[in-house]
Amino acid sequence: MFEHKKIQELDDFFIELKKRREQGVYFCRINGYNEQVQNFILKFYQSARQYGVVIEGKIPNPDEKNLAYYSEIMGMDFQMSLGFFTASLKKWLPRMNDYQRNQVAVSIYDSLDSMRKSGKNENMLKNAYIKFMCWLYYKFERIVSQLGDNNVPKILYEGQISNYELMLVSILSHAGCDVVLLQYQGDNSYRKLDPQSSRSQELAMPGLSAFPDYFNLKWIQGELQRKQNRERLYGVLPETVNCTNAWIQGKGFSDVLTPISGRGQEPKLFYNCMIRINGVEDKLTYQKDLFQLQKELKSSGRRLLILEQEVPKPGMDEIGAVRRKNYGNQEQMLLDLAGNIQYTANVELQRLMHKAFLDIIIEEGQKEGMNLNRLTNKAVYLLCWLKRYQSELFNNWKLPEIGCVIYLGGCKDENEAMFFRFLAKLPIDVLILVPDGNSRCVLEDPVLFEVNFSDSLNVTRVPRENGEIQIGTAAYHAERELDTLMYQDSGMYRNRQYKKAVAVTLRTMYEEIAILWDQELKYRPNFSTSEDTVTMPVIFAKVSGVKEQNAARYWSGMKGLLTGDTLLIKQVPYVNSTDYNPIKAHAAEFFKNGKVQKAKIRAHPDYQYGVLREEVQEHILEKLQALIDMRAIRGTFENGTEYTIVSTVLNLKKEIVRLIQKFDFTRKNPKIVYINPTEKPISLEDSIITAFLNLVGFDVIFFVPTGYQSVEQHFNRGLMEEHQIGDYLYDLKVPEFASVSSNSSTRQSWRERIFKRGT
């Protein structure tokens, strides 16, 4: 029989019999868990499936059919002799050779003899013998014919083993099997059967903990299946792998410029880097250093891709070019989409791309909240970007060449971060520059090396030519730093500090309008700034009636609203539908699929706002989209009113456009006073203009002495606050305000007379 030997390390189990330090077999109990144990069990499970037996739970006791068949073939005789056991095994398990039969017979005899010596009678021995024979036939028949082989057969038992099961497993072990017991509940139950631990060895290893709740053989089966699926996905792996950052000195630019030959000599590795530099080391020389970096990279013959501020999202044509289907699971999706990666010019590079793609998308798939549809979209994005930049980065590539990608501005979202993590697995240096301390790059990766500087500089472009370099003097940068200290979270704002703004309409008491009217926006309630956006509290109101029917005071008080930034409208309508408008013919092409086509609008010869500052143009187009999305104008997305909105907003009169161009979001805002003293209706275009200018940040107030409905006839909902201040008067004529009295008494009585608090 084979003797049990003690293992020195878990891999001893997988050594062939003739190569083992001591000729023998191993019988080990595993009561604790770590990563090494998990990997061993995965490997042992595969071996037991192939060359042995896996027992999940108890070995079923022989049933009536099993016993009837045994009785029919073998009869019910029993003799406590080695010859009887040998002869019985020859008849019952004919595939065993003489050596195997003798090993098992001797082992059975020893086990039953041990029972007899412990006081068990012959009937108990017979029952145990028949149970062993049935188990050997029904559960272990495939293993007994391998006993004594150089490739030692394996038994993996999961759970708390019983006395008779332990006896049979010991019989097979002594006959030439390796055995592992997986005991998730610990060793107490086993110790009752084998107090001296004489039949098996308990695995002693530092750092063992309790088995995780999820861990069992079913989980192992799933892991192996997933591993097989992955192997099927990956196919032939590349011969080279990336050695990222292990060779760098941590100096940033100089690491990227390190010659490829000076990075390492191992032929199975390619040496690249993945570096992010936050801030700038020297404001005075940063742009010159950046120019010199790209110049030296080009002169060295390395492929260089420079991206600035964003990686443009894939267009519909790019997305449509990716071959894809409907998928039922992640593996199916990966297997199909990976087929889009084709680079026949270099098979090794294609395999590197294929593996990097699968690695990254599998990592993305493990993120919390990820579903198949979202993961598929990410994979398509990655394929689009790879195809877009593939030739620029890898044209005629061969080892050990390493290209370089410089990304100025930092990753804005998780898709961009995914793309650069992907590139870092390829023969590419990835250098991410975030010189502006107010910017944030969302890229996270265990391999990423970061260089941090305290100084900050707003750089939006990598200079390609000497003429593009703009270098500030020391005094200039000192002034910028002082500027930041003064205007950041201080309540003070420099001219046109913010480029984006959102208007919120104040719901006020009638008397508050005069108080707020000529205030700077920053002093109004609910004004705020957040990052790069201002929240502007504005007035949008209608005043109906005339206080005490006193028209003179009514006009005099109204004159007090006519500040230098106020547009007075007293001819109704201000814009008529019949007025010439060159934009009308193009409105349908300027608005498609629910979106304002900004690029088409700006490129069109009839676009009138091209002379305005870029941020002003963007502000106008954003608020145009917002007005349509609100569906505030009656008929939007019902009878084509959205096209009227587009043509009206893009054809504003020059006096309004100039007010918008002049507008600083933190100071006094432009205003409109619109007077409608008659029954004449306000046009749809006037309603569009005033609603739009409310979103832009204008104060808009309508004076309607008749109390009639006017602008609100074209609104789907109440956008304005209406104030009823007195009796309705009809057929009033709007005076020339230059002739209206504006002496001090009139000015002082404005609040009392027009916005009277109760006198």
Image (cartoon, rainbow, N blue to C red):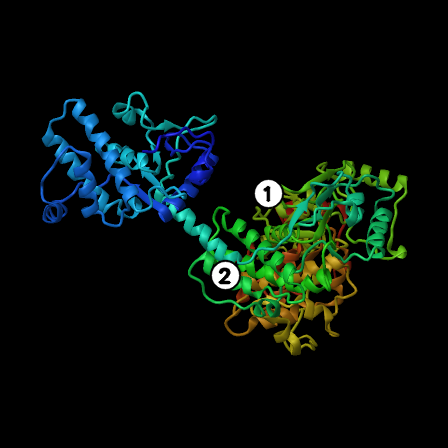
Residue positioned 56% across, 61% down in the render: 380
User: Quadrant where the C terminus lies?
Assistant: top right
Viewer-side residue, 90 vs 674: 90
145 left or right of 325 in image: left
Residue 179 location, x and y as percent?
35, 36
Question: Quick check: 333 above or below 498?
Answer: below
| Residue 335 numbered mark, or none | 2
372 left or right of 170 in image: right
Amino acid on which the number 2 mark rests in the picture? Leu
The residue mark sitting in front, 1 or 2, is 2
Residue farthest toward the top in the current orientation of the protein: 196
> Marks 1/2: CA distance?
75 Å
Residue 269 location, x and y as percent?
67, 48
The answer to which image quadrant residue 202 occupies is: top left
Question: Which element type, helix, strand or loop, lies under badge 1?
Answer: loop
608 left or right of 316 in image: right
The answer to which image quadrant residue 349 occupies is: bottom right
Residue 470 location, x and y as percent?
87, 50
**Around disc 1, counting alpha carbons within 10 Å, would you say few (fewer than 14), some (14 to 19), or many (20 or more)?**
few
Residue 475 location, x and y as percent?
90, 39
Question: Quick check: 629 above or below 641?
Answer: above
Question: Which element type, helix, strand or loop, lies under badge 2?
Answer: helix
Amino acid on which the number 1 mark rests in the picture? Arg
Q: Is residue 132 visible?
A: no
Q: Is residue 281 visible?
A: yes
Viewer-side residue, 561 vs 738: 561
| Residue 757 numbered mark, or none | 1
User: Quadrant where the N terminus lies?
Assistant: top left
